[in-house]
Image: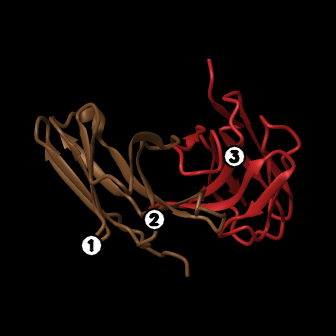
């Protein structure tokens, strides 16, 4: 059963703590992406990676970090420097970094208090 | 700047009616467009896509129309069903700086439209 998995579905953290969100895909896709979604808004790109060991900042990368050590994994760390981290985080992948459909995972809802 | 829109456009239809959801895109250089459906608390699901060398594409019960002159995209859903109720997003990609202008896959999403289908 191929697809993208994100874990956990719900995550609660105290302010000042770093937290890492997991994203795994078994679609053999080269490109992976992280988006943030706030209530009533569209998706905003945080980071993307077109190939293993390479990634670029998206539109709202401040306060976030990523790594791409394996093709199938693209974890996102929300650091304490992120001023407003509570949001719905979505991971996606596409066959390549070109103009192709992006497949989305089920999302992780992060709440920081 | 950040979008501060908290009130998404809404469309309410009766079951069996046809629905048309509109989207104005921002970049005249965009060469690939996608429509996604997102149900509450879930990730977006692909509906249909279209490239800029086309002006119409049909899928099962859905049709996407592209008007590059006015930078407008629309999604038509035939015989709308209650299961179609969701938020619908359009997204565009622009060609990257590589030789040949190959898109680097950065999707820019619209704000979304809430579709409610009444039985």
Viewer-nearest residue: B9 or B50: B50
- Secondary structure of the residue carrying tag 3 is strand
Question: Residue, x 65% and y 50% (percent of image)?
Answer: A97
Give the drawing colour for chain B: brown
| Residue to which mark 1 is pinned | B70
Q: Which chain is painted in red?
A: A
In percent of width and height, residue B5 lies at 42, 72
Figure check: B44 above or below B60: below
Distance of label 3 from label 2 (alpha carbons): 20 Å
Residue B57, image x, y percentages:
28, 43
- Residues A76 and B77: in front is B77
Mark 2 neighbour class, 10 Å CA radius: few under 14, some 14 to 19, many 20 or more: many
Report helix, strand or loop for mark 1. loop
Q: Which residue is mark 2?
A: B30
Q: How far, Cα to Cα, is label 1 from label 2? A: 13 Å
> Contact, CB < 8 Å: mark 3 with mark 2?
no
Same-chain check, marks 1 and 2: yes
């Amino acid at each position: 059963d191929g697809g993208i998995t994100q874990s956990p579905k719900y995550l609660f953290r105290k302010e000042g703590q770093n937290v890492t969100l997991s994203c795994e895909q078994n679609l053999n896709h080269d490109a992976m992406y992280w988006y943030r979604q706030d209530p009533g808004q569209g998706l905003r790109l945080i980071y993307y990676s077109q190939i293993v060991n390479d990634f670029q900042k998206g539109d709202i990368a401040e306060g976030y970090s990523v790594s791409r050590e394996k093709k199938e994994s693209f974890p996102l760390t929300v650091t304490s420097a992120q001023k407003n981290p509570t949001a719905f985080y979505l991971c996606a992948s596409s066959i390549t970094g070109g103009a192709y459909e992006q497949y989305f995972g089920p999302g992780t809802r992060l709440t920081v208090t | 700047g950040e979008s501060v829109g908290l009130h998404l456009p809404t469309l309410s239809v009766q079951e069996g009616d046809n629905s048309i959801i509109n989207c104005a895109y921002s970049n005249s250089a965009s060469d690939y467009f996608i429509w996604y459906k997102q149900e509450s608390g879930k990730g977006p699901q692909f509906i249909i896509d279209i490239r800029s060398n086309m002006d119409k594409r049909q899928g099962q019960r859905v049709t996407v129309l592209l008007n590059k002159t006015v930078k407008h995209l629309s999604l038509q859903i035939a015989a709308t069903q209650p299961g179609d109720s969701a938020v619908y997003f359009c997204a565009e990609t622009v060609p990257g700086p590589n030789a040949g202008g190959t898109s680097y896959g950065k999707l820019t999403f619209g704000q979304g439209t809430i579709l409610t289908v009444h039985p």
